Amino acid sequence: MGTFSNLALGFQEIIALATLGFCLLGVTVGMLIGVLPGIGSMAAISMLMPLTYYLEPGQALIMLAGIYYGAQYGNSITSILLNVPGTPSSAVTTLDGYPLSKKGKAGPAIFITTSASFYGSCFAIICLAFFSPAIADFALKFGSVEYFSLMVFGLITASVVSPGSQLKGIAMVIVGLVIGLVGTDITTAKSRFTFGFIELTDGVTLVAVAMGVFGATEVIMNLSRSRHERGKAQKLSIRDLFPTWDDMRQSFKPMARGAPIGTFLGVLPGAGATISAFVAYGVENRVAKDRSRFGKGAIEGIAAPESANNAAAQGAFIPTLSLGIPGDAVMALMLGALLIHGVQPGPQLISDHPEIFWGLLASFWIGNLMLMIMNIPMIGIWVRILTIPYRYLYPCILMLVCVGVYSVNNSAFDLMIVFAFTIIGFGMAICKLSPAPMLLGIVLGVMMEDNLKRAMLLSRGDLMVFFERPISAVLLGLSAMVIILPLLITALRRKRKVEG
Amino acid sequence: MTNQTDETCRPNLTLRNRVAGFLLIMIGMYVSYEAQRYGLGKLTRLGPGALPFGLGILMALLGAMIAILNPEGGENAPALKWRPLVMVLSALLSFALLIDTTGLLAATAALVFLSGMADPESTLPSLGAIFLLLISFVYIVFVRLLGIPFSLIGN
């Protein structure tokens, strides 16, 4: 296989000084927002997204991806020191990380999570390098029938696995698909759902929607929450970081177990990072000789989940890059960035734009290395940053949201979309409807319609074609299972509740 | 009595589900109605309204299921507080309205000071400092480096 020569191409791509610079910018911003409680990586990516229009598509992707996995590193610092997880995926790290910090072992804990994160990422990157081209090759043979079914499968799994009710997740996917179809129909040039706004004929600007439902809504929700006491972060310097040999020895095996769990679960669409962290923690709990140590500061309890959630963050790129099917909202935005540059995501991406794929891959490795280097010697700075009060931060977030959206099309109309989707996003939060599946739907709407139309044209209007082609039939069967299983489980649980 | 404590634990989730379901039904029906005007086409040659028509029906069905089945789950919904909601929304709206008319300076000022009022602990001097910081950052990065045609004082 040409994996190694391809990787060489990738490293050539990233070695360019400018590209390295954007990688560094991405991981630094990621680290920053990971450390700061209250700003998710989703908001940060949507804020920096407009910047990427001025970059090469490869560089744009490298920077956005850097924010995504950089945030995973930053999160673990806040989880350990403050007991506040930045994102759900690092919630598990607080379970044993905060007790460790109370014991005065915050430094070694951060050292271990950083190493575990690095190890998990590297493992997943290697898998990405070997599996993605193979998967893409396989998917290249897909016709529009298979592709349509694949998108159905991706959307359904993503909405069912993401937190909250499955029913609501699927409903939000449908809402997203409809929003995605707003604008001019490709084949007939008919305007759909534009309500007379010329600005909507090219469709709804994805970034504007994302900044409304994620960026601004998040600010409102954070401000609405009752202020809980913020723990005081202790001061740390490099000297406090080095773990004992015993700590290191205890964390090797959990790291090694966490990485494959994370990679595998990360590939599946949905909240891969969060679930894999929980699963990895559960596995450690099960194999441990002395279970009572968990929750009181067990090193294994931070090493395994951190290895797993970072592996999952990298693994999530496998379906995104090899199939063009985003697993979560962040990946949807990445695909959006590619589309804006006229790069069509899908199985042909790796063969048509090897420099983008392999460059991104090489950047992952370099970015993780940068994060490792930044994390350990600069720990003192990060600790100080995490004590910045939210009231100084949120006006800046809102400003970046507005300036960012405006600069996409130099259009104040897009800002009105942010305004509208902030109201919608807040309403959704009140009704516990999660916005991530909606965003996936928006990205895939037009692609799905296109494939459906082509499939129908080729099969002469025979809907059975989706069940007659074997790959498509399997995918649809799996989708049905994904829907029915959780419904059955809840129905059984309800029945038991009634009887009990 | 147990019922009552349960109700205080998750306030109004049932009501919220009913409202969400009802809205989805209404929107779904509207989408389908609007879509069939675009032309549904035939199965061999799907028209521009075909997929949205189907999606609208599906949306309404799912809305009905949400209203009836009243699913649980999800993170805790935030408490409804008016101050952050109103202040953040008015900050966004005023930026949108001012940016093309009175320019970047006024729009930024409106955004920072209005959104600042969302948090009762914000003080005028700190907001002023944030304003100065943001305006210089945006001017240097977006206007100078990226060349986005923001005008500082409007046309």
Image: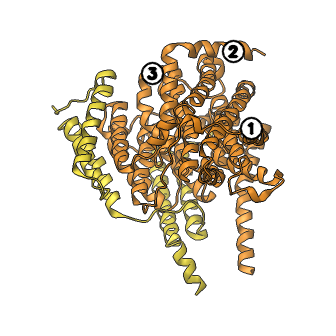
Q: Residues within 10 Å of mark 3 (few under 14, many from 20)?
A: some
Q: Secondary structure at mark 2?
A: helix
Query: What's the chain of the residue with tag 2?
Result: A
x and y, in percent, of residue B85 in the image: 35, 58
- As drawn, A278 above or below B11: above
Quadrant location of the N terminus of chain A? top right
Which mark sits nearer the N-terminus, 3 or 2? 2
Locate residue A355: give its quadrant. top right
The answer to whether residue B129 shows anywhere in this view is: yes
The 10 Å Cα crowd at callout 1, few under 14, some 14 to 19, many 20 or more, is few
Depth-wise, is mark 1 or mark 2 nearer the camera?
1
For badge 2, the amino acid type reads Asn
Residue B73 in the image: x percent, y percent? Answer: 60, 63
Q: Position of residue A5 (x, y in %)?
A: 71, 12
Chain letter of mark 1 equals A
Which residue corresponds to mark 2? A6
The type of residue carrying mark 3 is Leu
Q: Quadrant of residue B107?
A: top left
Q: How is the image coloured?
A: by chain
Secondary structure found at label 1: helix
User: What is the letter of the yellow chain?
Assistant: B
Residue bearing mark 3: A55
Q: Are marks 1 and 2 on the same chain?
A: yes
Give the Cα separation between the discs numbered 3 and 2: 23 Å
Q: Residues within 10 Å of mark 2 (few under 14, many from 20)?
A: some
